[in-house]
């Protein structure tokens, strides 16, 4: 049932790790003059990387600064609502379990009706009918599902693809697994939280629907793509890798300063898969292969290796040698799709782009505040005294987002790719106007102009996957 991963040996990766010599794989040189590389260096790690297998993780507060990352972005007044939300989630699950039809074994005409909260079922279901729309508002969906956007969205996509039946997944185990994923995202993080994971999962679904992928991906590819999107930032501490390294955090030591966060997300996801026993009915070899391939997808989101993946992608497109009947090539395209989904916020409509930009900048600045408080070198992008949302976003769009999505549009030249590049251009111009003309009147006028242009550019309704003339 499960296709073997290219060039992997999952059984060996689970054995005790043997120390290997460090390799400078994908690292960005300090003396590079390339502007894209310079910008990525500010976002991620520039240190030596090595490959690791599964090692036992431990949890705890920061050993150097004694900073508990789980409360890093918390606010005193947030304790009440968080507890109330947990209670509502529990009640939702109880309603799901105590449904008379479900307990009597009667097949449900719409399994999603047992997942959504009663008060929000109608509106949320209407939104899910348009889950493939690029304008999908994940913030609204999160409110309509009572803070359970990741659980409900992912369950719906599993169900719509028929993955529950294909892989003979136990619905209770699947629900438990998705709830554990959602709970392991830290709600105190302004950006790296369960809503971001749900947004990436929705974007991933849009890419999986693109003709080149929809016609070639296997059921196993679909399963892995959705799982990787939902878990790609699992248990994110709200600070970046350089912060963990310079403060001697145990995760940095565990993963030898190599893709620290991405390795942690992967191992956390594997831990939840095993704890929930969601795939326990599969043959061991298939289960281990899935875990290994899941890790390969999540590790691809390491921003410090952006140029590596982009160069390989560009090389394939130049040579026109991508063959999606080849399992290795399909896996590589899934990696690129996940990378696009992870940083697609600037390609969303302005209203969504602006909200995400504010949230990620808030998280950056929180880290900078901690660094300044403890007399550490402040990460350039995290310094609220010398940076602004507009400057950060313009740089991010120019040196990271735009190069990636230009290549993706070469691979998949469809209405969706054209729409994303259109939004990216408008949003970039919007941030420039906001930076150069901070006056509120000018900002309102600029937003109205962007809205008008966006409507004009989408005046012709084309089916997703078709090319514009």
Image (spheres, rainbow, N blue to C red):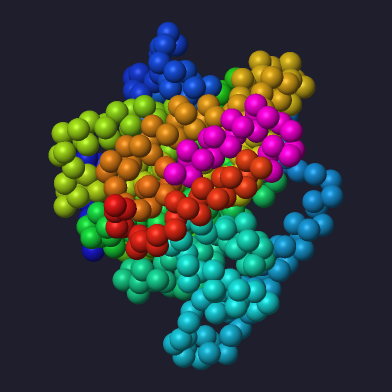
The N terminus: image quadrant: bottom left
Q: Is residue 232 above or below residue 367?
A: below
Residue 218 quadrant: bottom left
| Whether residue 228 can be seen here | no
Q: Is residue 443 magenta?
A: yes
Instruction: Kindly identify the residue that appears in the image at 66 percent across and 23 percent down.
Output: 387
Horizontal and vertical percent for residue 251? 55, 32
| Whether residue 139 can be seen here | yes
Image label count: 0
Residue 464 quadrant: bottom left
Horizontal and vertical percent for residue 89? 66, 67
Horizontal and vertical percent for residue 198? 53, 55
Q: Is residue 296 above or below residue 173?
A: above
Q: Is residue 92 magenta?
A: no
Horizontal and vertical percent for residue 303? 45, 31
- In the displayed structure, does residue 391 sit left or right of residue 464? right
Q: Is residue 304 above or below residue 265?
A: above
Along the line of sight, the residue nearer the viewer: 92 or 198: 198
Q: Is residue 309 above or below residue 103?
A: above
Spot the residue most to the top.
31
Give the overall secondary structure of the magenta segment. Answer: helix
Instruction: Kindly identify the residue that appears in the image at 65 percent across and 26 percent down.
Output: 436
Instruction: Kindly identify the residue that appears in the image at 77 percent across and 63 percent down.
Output: 84
Along the line of sight, the residue nearer the viewer: 449 or 234: 449
Instruction: Kindly identify the residue that appears in the image at 64 percent across and 67 percent down.
Output: 144
User: Bounds of the magenta span?
Assistant: 422-444
- In the displayed structure, does residue 460 sit left or right of residue 188? left
Along the line of sight, the residue nearer the viewer: 338 or 9: 338
């Amino acid at each position: 049932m499960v296709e073997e991963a290219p060039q992997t040996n999952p059984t060996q990766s689970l054995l005790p790790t043997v120390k290997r010599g460090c390799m400078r794989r994908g690292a960005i040189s300090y003396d590079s003059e390339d502007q894209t590389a310079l910008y990525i260096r500010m976002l991620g790690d520039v240190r030596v990387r090595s490959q690791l297998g599964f090692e036992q993780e431990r949890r705890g507060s920061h050993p150097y600064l004694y900073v508990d990352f789980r409360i890093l972005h918390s606010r005193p007044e947030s304790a009440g609502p968080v507890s109330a939300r947990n209670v509502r989630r529990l009640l939702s699950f109880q309603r799901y379990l105590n449904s008379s039809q479900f307990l009597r074994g009667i097949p449900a005409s719409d399994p999603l009706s047992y997942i959504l909260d009663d008060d929000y079922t109608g509106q949320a279901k209407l939104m899910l009918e348009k889950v493939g729309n690029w304008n999908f508002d994940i913030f609204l969906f999160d409110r309509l599902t009572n803070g359970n956007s990741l659980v409900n969205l992912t369950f719906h996509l599993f169900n719509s693809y028929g993955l529950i039946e294909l892989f003979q997944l136990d619905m209770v185990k699947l629900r438990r697994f998705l709830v554990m994923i959602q709970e392991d995202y830290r709600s105190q993080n302004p950006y790296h939280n369960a809503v971001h994971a749900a947004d990436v999962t929705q974007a991933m679904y849009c890419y999986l629907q693109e003709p080149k992928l929809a016609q070639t991906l296997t059921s196993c590819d679909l399963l892995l793509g959705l799982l990787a999107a939902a878990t790609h930032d699992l248990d994110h501490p709200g600070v970046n890798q350089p912060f963990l390294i310079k403060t001697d955090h145990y995760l940095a030591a565990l993963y030898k300063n190599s893709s620290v966060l991405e390795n942690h997300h992967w191992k956390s996801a594997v831990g939840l898969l095993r704890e929930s026993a969601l795939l326990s009915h599969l043959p061991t070899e298939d289960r281990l292969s899935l875990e290994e391939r899941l890790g390969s997808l999540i590790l691809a989101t390491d921003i410090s290796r952006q140029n590596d993946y982009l160069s390989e992608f560009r090389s394939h497109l130049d040579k026109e040698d991508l063959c999606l009947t080849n399992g290795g090539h399909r896996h590589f395209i899934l990696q690129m799709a996940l990378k696009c989904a992870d940083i697609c916020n600037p390609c969303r409509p302005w209203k969504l782009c602006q909200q995400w930009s504010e949230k990620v900048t808030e998280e950056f600045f929180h880290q900078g505040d901690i660094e300044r408080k403890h007399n550490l070198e402040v990460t350039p992008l995290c310094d609220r005294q010398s940076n602004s949302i507009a400057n950060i976003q313009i740089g991010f769009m120019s040196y990271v987002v735009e190069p990636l999505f230009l290549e993706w549009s070469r691979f998949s030249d469809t209405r969706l790719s054209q729409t994303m590049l259109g939004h990216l251009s408008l949003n970039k111009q919007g941030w420039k106007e906001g930076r150069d003309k901070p006056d509120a009147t000018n900002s309102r006028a600029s937003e109205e102009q962007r809205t008008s242009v966006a409507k004009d550019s989408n005046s012709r309704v084309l089916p997703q996957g078709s090319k514009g003339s």
